[in-house]
Amino acid sequence: MEEDKLLSVEQLIYAYAKGVFPMADEGEIHWYSPDPRAIIPIDTYKPAQSLRSVINKHLFEIRIDNQFEAVMRCCAGPRATDSETWISEEIIQAYTDLYRMGFAHSVEAYVDGKLVGGLYGVALGGAYFGESMFSLVSNASKVAFHYLMILLREQGYSLLDTQFMNDNVLRYGAIEISRKDYKSRLAKALKKTCTFKLPKNDY
């Protein structure tokens, strides 16, 4: 029943606004607020030259919010290096509810109409909280991420949260800041009003 759901849209929005996010471990939800916190500076982002070459080939069609739940389920699938996932069925359902209410968004890469890569996250004010990405074709998620960064920059977002530092986010220019600094940046970002839509220009 709806009232028995452990995760609700209201609970998630409140948590993200406070700098807290959930992850599932063996079906149980745990809440996190890391210190230090990993973020990717939006204004200084530049794609690697190798990625620029891929982008210029126009190998992928990029769409927004076309298959949000499918993106989540692909992100929850087994990885080559790790069979565990923190994206449980409960989390998929809760974030899909967030998406339906306009608080969660996906950036998707397609080849011949088939979803081959993408990412998803939560958007509040001028903050985007990146959650996970996947790629079925080489460079698909990297190109989706590039368009996410262009979107965030053009629409005036000021904070891209990537939660924990790891090799994947480090390659995109992630840095670590203190929890105190993060909450200060988050408070400022939440006061902004931004629209999540692709830029008109072709990058």
Image: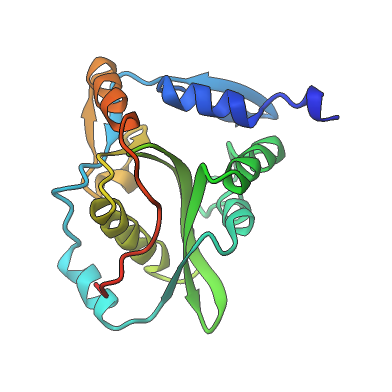
Q: How is the image coloured?
A: rainbow
Most extreme residue toward the right, as rendered?
Answer: 1
Q: Is residue 147 left or right of residue 174?
A: right
Residue 143, image quadrant: bottom left
Residue at position x 31%, y 36% in the image:
192
Q: How many marks?
A: 0
In this view, the residue in front, 15 or 81, is 15
For residue 189, above or below residue 139: above
**Picture quarter with the N terminus:** top right
Q: Is residue 153 left or right of residue 128?
A: left
x, y (%) of residue 177? 22, 25
In this view, the residue in front, 13 or 94, is 13
**Picture quarter with the C terminus:** bottom left
x, y (%) of residue 3? 80, 24
Residue 21 seen: no
Residue 131 seen: yes
Residue at position x 37%, y 63% in the image:
198
x, y (%) of residue 191? 31, 29
For residue 48, above or below residue 21: below
For residue 164, above or below residue 149: above
For residue 97, above or below residue 109: above
Residue at position x 70%, y 29% in the image:
27
Residue at position x 29%, y 83% in the image:
57
x, y (%) of residue 55? 28, 75
In this view, the residue in front, 21 or 101, is 101
In this view, the residue in front, 201 or 149, is 201
